[in-house]
Image (cartoon, rainbow, N blue to C red):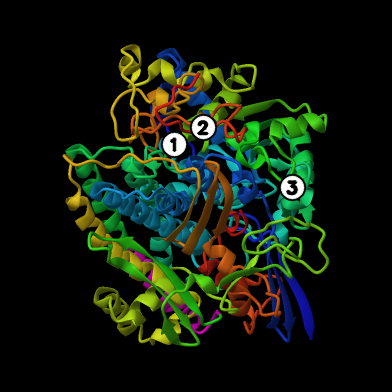
Amino acid sequence: MSENVRIDPFTRIEGHLSISLELDNSRVTGAQCSGEMFRGFEQILRGRSPLDAQQVTQRICGVCPVSHGIASVLSQEEAYKVEVPKNGRIIRNIMLAANYIQSHITHFYHLSALDFVDVTGILTYTGNDRFLKGIKDWVQSEVQSKKLFPAAPFLPRYEAKYLENPEVNMSALRNYFTALDMRAMAHQLVAIFAGKMPHMATLVPGGVTEKVTSKKIALCRSKLGTLKDFFETSYISDLFAVAGEFPEYFDMGKGCGNFMSFGVFTDDRGEVLFPAGVIVDGAQQPLNLQHITEEVRYSKYSDDSGFHTTKPEPHKQGAYSWIKAPRYNGRPIEVGPLARVLTGYESGMQPELKAVTDKFLQATGRSLADLDSCLGRHAARVIELQVLFKHLEQWIEELDPAAPTCVDFRLPATGKGIGLTEAPRGALGHWLDIKNSKISGYECIVPTTWNCSPRDNNDVPGPVEQALIGTEVMDTSNPMEASRIVRAFDPCLACAVH
Amino acid sequence: MTTLTRRQLLELGSKITLLMGLGSSAIPDIAEALENLASGRAKVLWLQAQSCSGCSISMLDSEAPGPAELVTRYISLLFHQTLSAVTGEKCMDIINESSSEGGHILIVEGSIPAGMPEACMMGHTPVTELVTRAARSASHVIALGACAAFGGIPAAENNPTGSVSVVEFLKSQAITTPTLSIPGCPSHPDWLVGSLVHLLKYGLPPVDTLGRPLMFFGETNHHKCPRFYDYERSNFAKSFSEEGCLFELGCLGVVTYADCTLRDRNGGINNCIKAGAPCIGCSSEIFAKNASLPFYRKGERKS
């Protein structure tokens, strides 16, 4: 029996996404991933001062502005031929890494957890945690009230299997709320040098305007210590709790099998913590930017649109998404924490990342190939954070209050630059062209553009679409399996379309 | 319903009184407002249009009350795209039924693609329609953030979607629901929480001609600038690495009405100008509007 299911709007992600599924005997045979919102950042940037770009592009996304800002200043620094001093480089690493922490905590707890944690479990709570007792009273009174939508925004929800062990469930639920404070604290860690978050104020070509002081170093240490404690005692155990009760999700949501990382977190010697690399058909290869194209057959842009041209055509026949379809050598590619872990692991140059990954695989009795799955994507965030925490601690100690954080530069009349980095959600590139001291071209290819892309000119579905195909959906009025698979990619739609 | 103890309410009231810059005599009133909020009278429907979610993320950074307290004790958050457990079709039921019932506070984040309604869709419905319906039956509308209040970057010069601010859009639909503009990119969580409390206790707070609450946007950033002394002595930084007043680097603090330099961001950790970054005027009505007015200048006096 065939059936169509539409999840629209798809919530608890950033932005406007809808998912359409075709099912045959409960199994997904076709999937469409649609970006539903368009603003036109690349058009808006043209004609502006290139210096505006790191401020304007940060506003593409309120969840990962740090990455856009950094991609933009990298592209400008290439065009201006300016070198960032050591302090500036370290501060950027700290701000970006702290935002990884913010983004991953937000993703696991506030976007994904409600697919696994049973909020109604609070009604049977008998412990003495004052906060949980308050939440219990609230849910109880809400459920008994005559409100149209009691206990919003936690109810209604899809009815499905949730965590069954009451202790594990309660602990994860408590951590949902603690994690709100933790993600705000990670933002504070960014803001120590960024001035504010979201949307950093201090990032400029040549470095960062904020200075290093011993007080700031101490603040960083303190915030980082609290965050690390939460990560080690709560985040990791909650991930294992979910993995323990939903092991089948290691076998669900296998994507397109191709992965790419642009590389991120450069040190003094120019070495990168998470290296650039591409895996296609299981084989690791060096990144070649010439292989990147953007296709628009199913995207709401004119047929001559692509990598460097964006002409909106909202009523284009057959188009179902505002997202373009970027391809690498004609192939769909998955980007994100899983891609970073796999490309790093396969590179043979990252013993630390490999050790953490192996330890995780050992603890769960899984193979590296199993990470290409719904649960594997959640696990990859934890794996990379484990590596990142250690390096963040080192970077903070490398800051030097006596040294500059930025250098001056001259704005050229013409120039070109490419800024590549890794956002929490994956490979991010900004391509900048300057003529007459103004932006003459600005193109962004953003992580979710890759992951949530529609079918390409050859009708090959994008990574999220491929991850959905083959999934068994037990109850089509509560398509929880599909929701969990899509959410594990951490889609950011404001980024994907921009 | 959880009711906070009188003492807790007074404590919280005093924190909010402080953040709103009201005198101590307002403490019991604020406590009462919170009590009203706690009794579930404040239904809030939060819609995102052409947004980056930055104002939602900023709201999550709220300190006192924090987001958990806000959602479980002070407001009934009927729907929020990033936080709601509900997904899919049922979301549309909530939005539509809430709009039919009315009496809610509508918070809109993001600008409105008035010239291309297909550029922002939810449940096959243009967000222009959803906002129109929800605003018509709302008790109040809050246009949250630079985009909703003034159009922001999506409505900047050369934008392809005919994007406008929520305020402008509602006007074009002849909707007269009282509307507050809380700009900023993103808006400061105190600005939203303080405005909500004021709205529920005293009604609409006094506003300037652009609909911004005077308690937050009554003076310019320049007024309480930590670099004011440098400005007075004409000690101007000529590059981003130099100390001094940031005016010649393009700082718009002199014309930008907001209390950023006094309030600080992210739990009091920092603010733009303090951190050596010129104010880019994100709470101003002209923020990002003109391609020819750059955020920064280098060693060139702005007149």
**Amino acid marked by disc 1:** Pro
Extent of the magenta region: A234-255
Residue that carries the numbered disc 2 in the rendered image: B193
Quadrant assignment for the N terminus of chain A = bottom right
> Residue A108 lies in what quarter of the image?
bottom left
Name the chain letter of the residue that bears numbered label 3: B
Determine the CA span between mark 2 and mark 3: 25 Å
Determine the CA span between mark 1 and mark 2: 8 Å
What SS does tag 1 mark?
Answer: loop
**Amino acid marked by disc 2:** Val
- Horizontal and vertical percent for residue B14? 40, 24
Estimate how packed mark 1 is, as few (under 14), some (14 to 19) or many (20 or more) residues with alpha carbons within 10 Å: some
Q: Which mark is residue B127?
A: 3
N-terminal label among 2 and 3: 3
Q: Is residue A23 left or right of residue A438?
A: right
Q: Do the residues labelled 2 and 3 touch (CB within 8 Å)?
A: no
Residue that carries the numbered disc 1 in the rendered image: B65
Mark whose residue sits in front, 2 or 3:
3
